[in-house]
Amino acid sequence: MKKVDDELLKKIVEEGKVMALFYDIEDVARLLGVSIRTVRYWIQTKQLKASKLGKRWKVDHDDLADFVNSRQNIKEGKETTENTEEKKECT
């Protein structure tokens, strides 16, 4: 994932501060700092839950928050693993 604006992530994740109930693909791409193509890939591969309303895909606020949290957990786990491997190499 490209560099994500921490303030925007906080707005997405914090409960009670929902700006919109649903986001379109363009909004998700802008909020996460990725391309529209990447968001569509996440939807097609079922990494990001979305619903088709008419001709447009919409992402529920809670589903976006879950997705962001899961990506952060994966990233944090990867960093922890890398740090452990670095310590092993140093000893």
Image (cartoon, rainbow, N blue to C red):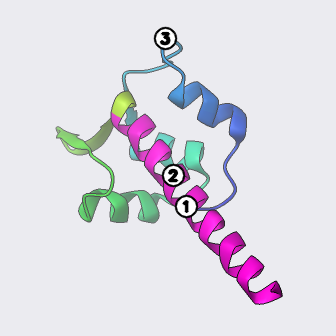
The residue that appears at 33% across and 38% down in the rendered structure is 59
Q: Amino acid at mark 3?
A: Gly
- Residue furthest out toward the front: 91
83 versus 17 height, above or below? below
Q: Quadrant of residue 5?
A: top right
Residue in the foreground of this view, choosing between 63 and 56? 63
SS label for mark 1: helix
Residue 36, given in percent of the width and then of the height, sits at 46, 58
> What is the quadrant of the N terminus in the image?
bottom right
89 versus 64 height, above or below? below
How far apart are labels 3 and 2 at the CA level? 22 Å
Q: Amino acid at mark 1?
A: Gly
Within 10 Å of disc 1 (Cα), the crowding (few <14, some 14-19, many 20+) is few
The residue that appears at 43% across and 65% down in the rendered structure is 37
Say if mark 1 contacts mark 2, CB within 8 Å. Answer: yes
Residue 23, given in percent of the width and then of the height, sits at 40, 34
> Which residue position holds label 1?
77
> Which residue position holds label 2?
73
Magenta span contains residue 87: yes
